[in-house]
Amino acid sequence: MKKNSHTLLQITMHLYAWSAIILLIFDFATGNLSPNPIQDLEQRTGRHALILLVLSLFCTPIHTIFKWGEPLKHRRALGLYSFFYAVIHVIVFADLDFGLAWSALFQEVVTKPRLVVGTIAFFLLVPLAITSFDIWKKRLRKNWKRLHQVVYFIAPLIILHYLWSKKGDILSLQGEILQPMIYGVFVAALLILRIPLVKKIFHRAGG
């Protein structure tokens, strides 16, 4: 009998990745979207894209600290799921919000810092998603790893985009900025854990 190759972690990852779309469809069908459904779609798809990206960044530190290798097998899937929701996020903004009026859309983007950094982050994600498959890993060789390290620059940009999209004052810690700041702390910690010296310390601690 062939052994089932699907692990609990893998099944949980896929279910969670699809959960946002399933909940959006359910809320749409039952009329439970907010009074501003387009904004609701933008915020929920954008937030899920960020969470999935953060989870993909978690995989390597989990392996480094706990010597658990399975999350590394799902890192690419998490990254692609993140890009999938980022694409939906952008489509909702460009089409449903602006009706693909490119002139007005361009003017909106270039005049608002949150949209500038969000656009840069999205376009930087595109080559990572395209080259995430094994055939590109073989073609690019050492350059593949260098290219995909750009995600360490993309993640803070997305946090900044999210932070600027919320109403509040960073200096006084007022308004709706708590959640993006929590994500920012997580991302900062995950990036620190990738510093060679820090990784070396954890390797030594783990024996």
Image (cartoon, rainbow, N blue to C red):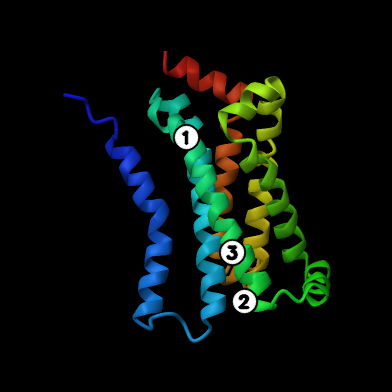
Q: Which of the 4 image quadrants contains residue 113?
A: bottom right
| SS class, disc 2 | helix
Query: Which residue occupies the extreme top position in the image?
Result: 207
Residue 119, compared with residue 109, is above or below; it is above
* Relative horizontal placement of residue 196, taking residue 27 as reference (left or right): right
User: Where's residue 144, x and y in %?
Assistant: 67, 27
- Mark 2 Cα-neighbour bin, 10 Å: few <14, some 14–19, many ≥20: some
* Relative horizontal placement of residue 4, taking residue 140 as reference (left or right): left
Camera-nearest label, 1 or 2: 2
User: Where's residue 11, x and y in %?
Assistant: 31, 43
Camera-nearest label, 2 or 3: 2
Q: CA distance from mark 1 to mark 2?
A: 34 Å
- Mark 3 Cα-neighbour bin, 10 Å: few <14, some 14–19, many ≥20: many
- Residue type at mark 3? His
User: Where's residue 82, x and y in %?
Assistant: 53, 50
* Relative horizontal placement of residue 27, taking residue 167 as reference (left or right): left
Mark 1 lies on residue: 59
Regarding residue 53, the answer to whether it shows in the image is yes
- Residue at 67% across / 57% down in the picture? 160
Q: CA distance from mark 1 to mark 3?
A: 24 Å
Quarter of the image with the C terminus is top left
- Residue at 49% across / 36% down in the picture? 75
Question: Is 131 in front, or is 189?
Answer: 131
Mark 2 lies on residue: 96
Residue 62, compared with residue 120, is above or below; it is above
- Residue type at mark 2? Leu
Which numbered disc flags the more N-terminal residue, 2 or 3? Answer: 3
| SS class, disc 1 | helix
Which numbered disc flags the more N-terminal residue, 1 or 2? Answer: 1
| SS class, disc 3 | helix
Q: Which mark is residue 89?
A: 3
Q: CA distance from mark 2 to mark 3?
A: 10 Å
